[in-house]
Image (cartoon, helix red, strand yellow):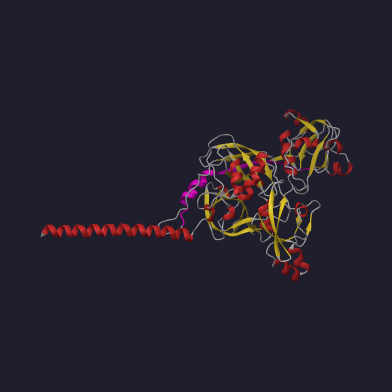
Amino acid sequence: MNTGKSKNVIFIVLVAIVSSVVTLLGYNALSKNNGKNLFSDSASEKTSEHVGVYAESFDQDKNVVLTNLTTSEGYPDFTEAAAKSVDGVVHVKTKTVTQQQYINPFDFFFGFGDRMPSQPREQVGFGSGVIISKDGYIITNNHVVANATEVSVTLNDNREFIAKVAGTDPNSDIALLKIEGDNFPYLTFGNSDALRVGEWVLAVGNPFNLTSTVTAGIVSAKNRGNVMGGGRDDIQAFIQIDAAVNPGNSGGALVNTRGELVGINTLIYSRTGDFAGYAFAVPISIAGKIAADLKEYGTVQRAFLGISAPNIDNIRREDPDKARELSQIKGVLISDFGDRSAAKAAGIQKGDIIKAINNVPIHNFAELQNQLTKYRPGEKVNVTVERDGSNRSFTVELTNNEGSTEITRSTNAVNSLGATFKPISEERKRALGISSGIEVESVESNGLFRKEGINKGFIIMRINNIAINSESDVANIVASTNNREQDKVLLVAGFYPNGRTQYIAIDLTNKR
């Protein structure tokens, strides 16, 4: 009798244990499913076709990503994504030498008098960067490294490297750096197009020189325009976030909860200079393509339809009713064409409204630009337009800004000047009373230098108010000036021995 009771007790206990285990497993499954529903990471979808191509340019391993993580309570867990990201984000330090100008008014106005030596001043800047390949390619912001005479990066494990600026693009504020080595930790590209407003993201960088800082927030808006300005080639499709971003975060990573790189943190909106709740990142769909172009061609390949759209902000000042009417249009109204228009050649007409590019819906100009930025001249896209109340499709072969389908490659920046240079020894600099300088060794008869009166023996102290001491200094300034959309002018300050200081402007848009 006692034995039977014991067996019954044991049976009841076993049933209770099994029931508890089943309940816990069921609760766990429900929690995970609820977590996925409440905090689904749409960027966990397959990387978009074009982003995948750019990732291949840097030999990224598609499997180096995390699963979407949540806690047992169903809340998002950022710990693994943060741990993965900080190793791929670097601290960028730059050195820039500027000259304090001292101009003798007699020398300037009357052509005589003594030169007044200028004193060089070294400035140090800081920012962030993201390693995107195991062999050391790094994306950062152009404004972080612009005009730098030296760029160094420090990894999260405190290793420090001198970085080479592999390419820059001021219009997108993206630059590509390269450090020597192999097997660096890096971040893989995610699908920034799949991000949704309200989705969790992390900002990783070095604000105020505080290395390896991670902040969390949500995507506040997508395709945010009119942030950097209104230039034709300027990015008008930013990701807006509310994760805390401050000076020093520039060039850092915006990642999703899987630890994938979905943007490059670029700027903040603030009246004080510090974070005020609004930060903006260049989507990786754009930044990745620009980095791939800089690596492969040395310059960015921009594709154009060759159309114009109404500027609603300008129209609103003169005709609010017309502006209100235009703002209701879902798509991009074509108001005119460029001198050489790929869209016009394909049969698209004025008054058509662009509704989609390769079946991706287009609601405004920022979304149109976001899509076109992914392509290169010579590629064909399917453009859906609304005309007379019905949709029509056209195949358009995209062109560059000159109307051709050719891919452009960067050339030696110094060659455009038609000159060679030789360094000046420190002893000779002291004899000349200068702190910086390089001598023109020869000039070509049809070069820009000869056209502006600069000949052999001319000593260049500064270009665009930046001290010059080597041919690479000249090349860097020429390259950065050439990348501007406007004002492609060099202001050269120099002199012939025993002559007065001259200030000579050279327009780089002039053809040799």
**Does the segment drawn in magenta span residue 95?**
yes
The quarter in which the C terminus is drawn is top right
Q: Going by the image, does 424 lie left or right of 243?
A: right
* Up/down of 412 relative to 314, above or below: above
Residue 199, horizontal then vertical, whole percent: 53, 58
Q: Residue at x 58, y 53 (%)?
A: 192
**Does the segment drawn in magenta span residue 188?**
no
Q: Quadrant of residue 139?
A: top right
* Up/down of 149 relative to 236, above or below: above
Residue 507, horizontal then vertical, whole percent: 82, 43
Q: Nearer the viewer, residue 215 or 358?
A: 358
Query: Magenta residues?
Result: 76-102
The quarter in which the N terminus is drawn is bottom left
How many marks overall? 0
**Residue reaching furthest to the bottom:** 321
Q: Going by the image, does 499 lie left or right of 313?
A: right
**Residue reaching furthest to the right:** 110
Q: Nearer the viewer, residue 69 or 138?
A: 69
Q: Nearer the viewer, residue 43 or 211?
A: 43
Residue 235, horizontal then vertical, whole percent: 68, 53
